[in-house]
Image (cartoon, helix red, strand yellow):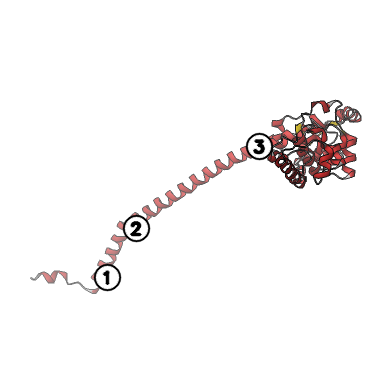
Amino acid sequence: MSVRSYFVFSKTEKTGIIVVFILILIVVILPRIVFVNTEKLQIEQDTLLAHLNREEIQNSFEYVRIKDTVSKKIQRLDINLATQQELENLPCIGAVMAKRIISYREKVKKFSSIEEIKKVYGLKDSCYQKILPYIFVDSEQKTEIKTEQKNVQKVNLNTCDSIQLVNLRGVGEKTVRRVLAVRRKIKIFYDMKQLNCIGLNAEVIKNLQNQCYVETGVISQIQKVSLNTLEEKQVFKSPGFTYEIAKSFVQYRKKLKKQGKSISSWEELVNNVEGIDKQWLDCWQVYYAL
């Protein structure tokens, strides 16, 4: 009998063999597929849970951090007693602004109301609105503050700083910059009338004269400079000398030098230097010698 005869099957037998083969495949392969997919699903699930747990932990720490920060800032402060560190904890108040607030209450006056903090140089209204819920002025101190305000002393024009000046009634930032620029140049104001010589309008001058003073006898502290020996570059930086006056003065002095002469009188300057007149001498003569 040939080998081929063993592989001859009827139609029914062929169908049975195919069914058995399919069942074997299902039994052998399907568990592996299910196991792999189940393992992959478990890994993905574990990864997702780990990610959620990390995010939850991070959110918890962030919540605690924010909560702690907010709790620090919501402590209401008496702006007449608060330290610099306490002020820096307020919204939009940094180290510079905290120092200005303290400088205002020490050098100008204590705050009689919350709104008065807006007078501190550089404090914007938007910042004021942010700190408003967190600041107050002790009502028990108001009586003392009002008493202090009645006895407010005038500001010394030779020793005051920008904070003291800018908080004077009717005195703005431009005026403050102008006054301090002149003071750096002349070193000492010897009389309040000098305010008429530095380019301020009449109303501002009146406000300064009502709220400032110059100590008596200070004129003796002025160190005079000789106009005959003053270096040319320094002339342009000296009290009372605008660019035009300095240029005219330098040209006249060069002319005298060629002739072997020097300036001998103030009248000579008035007659030969454009811009130097009696009014100029009243303001600036005290700083110079011939």
Q: Which residue matches tag 2?
A: 30
Q: Quadrant of the C terminus?
A: top right
Of the two numbered discs 3 and 2 on the same chain, state the one appearing first in sequence.
Answer: 2
Residue carrying label 3: 69
Question: In the image, what residue type sits under mark 3?
Answer: Thr
Q: Is residue 128 visible?
A: yes
Q: In this view, does 266 lie to the left or right of 258?
A: right
Q: Residue at x 30, y 64 (%)?
A: 22
Where residue 165 sits: x, y (%)? 81, 36
Q: Looking at numbered disc 2 in the image, what kind of residue is underneath it? A: Leu
Which residue is tagged 1?
15
Distance from Cα at disc 2 to Cα at disc 1: 22 Å
Q: Which of 135 and 147 is in front in this view?
A: 147
Foreground mark, 3 or 2, reads: 3
Element at badge 2? helix
Place of residue 286 in the rendered image (x, y in percent of width and height, measured from the top left): 82, 33
- Residue 60 location (% of width, % of height): 59, 40
> Is 56 displayed left or right of 71 in the figure?
left
Mark 1, secondary structure of its residue: helix
Tell me how far mark 3 sits from mark 1, CA to CA. 78 Å
The residue mark sitting in front, 2 or 1, is 2
- Of the residues shown, which amino acid type is indicated by label 1? Thr
Marks 2 and 1, the one that precedes in the sequence: 1
Numbered tag placed on residue 39 in the rendering: none
Asked whether residue 171 appears in the rendered view, the answer is no
Discs 2, 1 touching: Cβ within 8 Å: no
User: Which picture quadrant has residue 163?
Assistant: top right
